[in-house]
Amino acid sequence: KLDTSLLVHGYVQGAGKSLFFDRIMARIYGDYLLTLGQGQLDSQYNDWVEGKLFVTFEEIFQGNDKWGQMGRVKHLITGDTTYINKKFMSGWKADNFVNAVFLSNDMKPLSLEETDRRIMVLHPEGILPKDIQESISQALQDKDSKAIRAFLTYLLAKDLGDFDAHTKPLMTGAKETLIDLSRSSWEKFYNDWQRGYLDAPYMTCL
């Protein structure tokens, strides 16, 4: 269970986001993986989280929801336990083992704070080459899952150095851009003023 989550977003469609985090990872996690959308996040019922290890959220942030749901998203990422609500049943507390990935084609899929310590942001800038798409398609159709098992073996044998479950996410260029897009209007004005982007000189004034 990581204290961080991945956000992979951008206007480029066909970069392979869903192919990797849905179809490939589904072959690895099996019944312990779910792919969800906006409806599940908005719902008061969250029994889908129980017993799951990996959740891929596809295009879940639309309109004002990208701000209104951030509290729930933060708890999903870092909470050790969660309160389960199931329809027609009394709720109960359960351990939270879910690692989450958020995918979006929106340039601003959620509002990110400058001091954020939960989200690792990636911004694909190109389409997945056709030969790689075909190779992955063949691997997914293989009944013996040879390539999938080889990939899992690679992941398990990968030397992660000092990376652990509590390592903070990197400050990528994509994350800096998203933080900047998430600022309120007065913050954007102040930063542009301070950086000399405006005609007005940056100085004390009445």
Image (tube, rainbow, N blue to C red):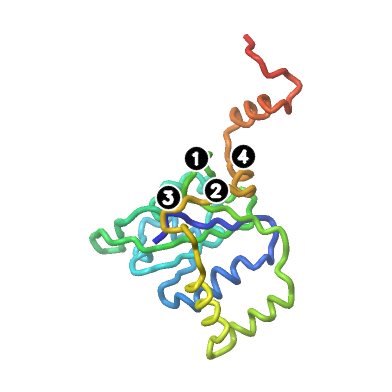
Q: Identify the residue under disc 2.
A: 110
Circle 2 residues within 10 Å: few <14, some 14–19, many ≥20 = many
Mark sitting earlier along the chain (2/1): 2
Residue at 67% of width from left, 65% of height from top?
15
Q: Is residue 95 left or right of residue 194?
A: left
Residue at 55% of width from left, 48% of height from top?
110
Mark sitting earlier along the chain (2/4): 2
Circle 1 residues within 10 Å: few <14, some 14–19, many ≥20 = few
- Between residue 202 and residue 35, name the one nearer to us: 202
- Between residue 31 and residue 3, name the one nearer to us: 3
Vertical side of 44 occupied by 155: above or below: below
Mark sitting earlier along the chain (4/3): 3
Q: Identify the residue under disc 3.
A: 74
Q: Is residue 93 left or right of residue 39?
A: left
Residues marked 4 and 1 touching at CB (< 8 Å):
no
- Between residue 69 and residue 164, name the one nearer to us: 164
Relative image position of residue 168 (x, y in whole percent): 47, 50
Q: Identify the residue under disc 1.
A: 115
Relative image position of residue 56 (x, y in whole percent): 50, 64
- Number of the label disc, if any, that sits on residue 124: none
Residues marked 2 and 1 touching at CB (< 8 Å):
no
Name the kind of residue labelled 3 in the image: Lys
Q: Residue at the far right: name it.
A: 199
Label 4 – label 1 distance at C-alpha: 12 Å
Relative image position of residue 201 (x, y in whole percent): 72, 18
Label 3 – label 2 distance at C-alpha: 12 Å
- SS at badge 3: helix
Residues marked 4 and 3 touching at CB (< 8 Å):
no
Name the kind of residue labelled 4 in the image: Asp
Instruction: Give the number of the mark in front: 2 or 1.
Output: 1
Residue at 66% of width from left, 25% of height from top?
194
